Structure formats: C-alpha cells, structure tokens
Image: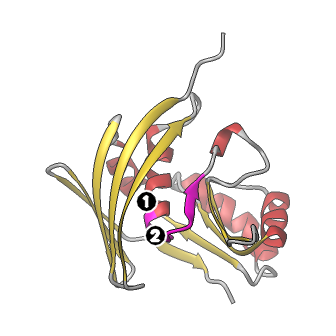
Amino acid sequence: MAQNATIHKVELSVSDMDRNYYQTHKLTVAKHPSETDERLMVRIVAFALNAHESLEVTRGLSTDDEPDIWQKSLSGRLDVWVALGLPSEKVIRQSCSKAERVVVYPYGGRTAKIWWDKMKGSAARFGNLEVISFSEKDTGELAQLTNRTMKFQINIQDAEVMVSVSDRIVYLKPLKWKSAA
C-alpha cells in the first residue's frame, strides 16, 4: 500500500527588504513520502525568496510536469518556475521554454557542486535561468526546524536570509551560481 503525503500547515511571514515585499502567507504543504525534511524546508525558503501574491506551492514530487513552486499570470502564463534539487539539462531546457523566469535551488553539498560543474556550460545559454545554492550545513540546520505546524518569520536583507521558527533562528547565505541575463 502506498504511503500518503504528510500535510504541513505553514504560516510564513516574509519581510524582504531587498524587494520591498512584506506579507504573510498561509500554506498547506504536502510532503511526499520520499521527500526529506531538508527538501521540505528548502521548498519553504524558496517560496519566501520568490514570495508574491500569486506564488503557489504545487504538487511537487508527485508530478513530473510541474515545478515545486510556480507563479502564473491572470492569463495563465507561467511567470516563475521554481525547482529544487538537481534537475537534468532536459528538465531545465523545458522549464526555461515554459516560463519567463526559472529558478533552481540545488542543495546537498558536494553532490550539488558536482552537478553544477557538469551543468554550468549548458545552462549558460538560458538567459531566464537563475541557480541559487544553499550550503549543506545551512539546509541541515533548516531540517531540524521541521514540524507539522510551523510559524515562520523570514527576513531577507542584502541577499542574506534569517529564518526564525519559535525560539530558533537559522541564518542562510544563498550562493548565486548563475544570474538571469
């Protein structure tokens, strides 16, 4: 019998001084049985880094043709496609052809670096692609904050991220491996 997804209720207060965006989002995030706590938390931080009133968490791992997070215009056009992990060159190419802006958040330390060393040559041709990495130490600390009901305060300033959950704080320094043209 297949396992069901675990539902996480998230109240996410985003204060993004870099983009002048201040909003609270109430999210219901389904954690796929094969998804780790680390990946779940990276997904929530990625949401905060791209926060917008139209941004949505998708079905993620349970579907191949959707990103982890997306933002659609009122006409249904894909404005933002956010993917986590280490997508193939084919997936990146398809994503870049479907959306105005594509952001990939690789994580996993040395594995992510090896993936990027292999991908950066072919990724250079995609002007709408950004690749932003997190250190293994940072994502490991994030994973320890996981709970079924979470109330986050995420502050973003000068490209640095402070994640506060209850009485615990994790500081993240995202590394921009590729900027959009």
The answer to whether residue 65 is left or right of residue 5 is right
Q: In x, y percent, where is residue 141?
A: 32, 49
Closer-to-camera residue (138/152): 152
Residue 14 falls left or right of residue 6 = left
Looking at the rendering, in which quadrant would you find the N terminus?
Answer: top right
Give coordinates of residue 153: x percent, y percent: 27, 61
Q: Residue furthest top?
A: 1
Q: Which mark is residue 45?
A: 1
Quadrant where the C terminus lies?
bottom right
Q: Furthest residue to the front?
A: 74
Residues in magenta? 48-57
Q: Residue at x 85, y 59 (%)?
A: 90
2 and 1 marks in contact (CB < 8 Å): yes
**The quarter of the displayed image where residue 154 is located:** bottom left
| Mark 1 crowdedness (10 Å alpha carbons): few <14, some 14-19, many ≥20 | many
Disc 2 crowd, CA 10 A, few/some/many (<14, 14-19, 20+): many
The disc at residue 49 is 2
Above or below for 36 versus 5 = below
Name the residue nearer the viewer: 13 or 137. 13
Using the image as rendered, state which of residue 114 and residue 122 is in the foreground: 122
Q: Amino acid at mark 2?
A: Leu
Label number found at residue 147? none
In this view, which residue lies farthest toward the bottom? 181
Give SS at disc 2: helix
Indicate whether 151 appears above or below 17: above
Q: Is residue 19 magenta?
A: no
Q: Residue at x 37, y 57 (%)?
A: 138
Question: Looking at the picture, how far across and down is residue 66, in whole percent?
Answer: 73, 52
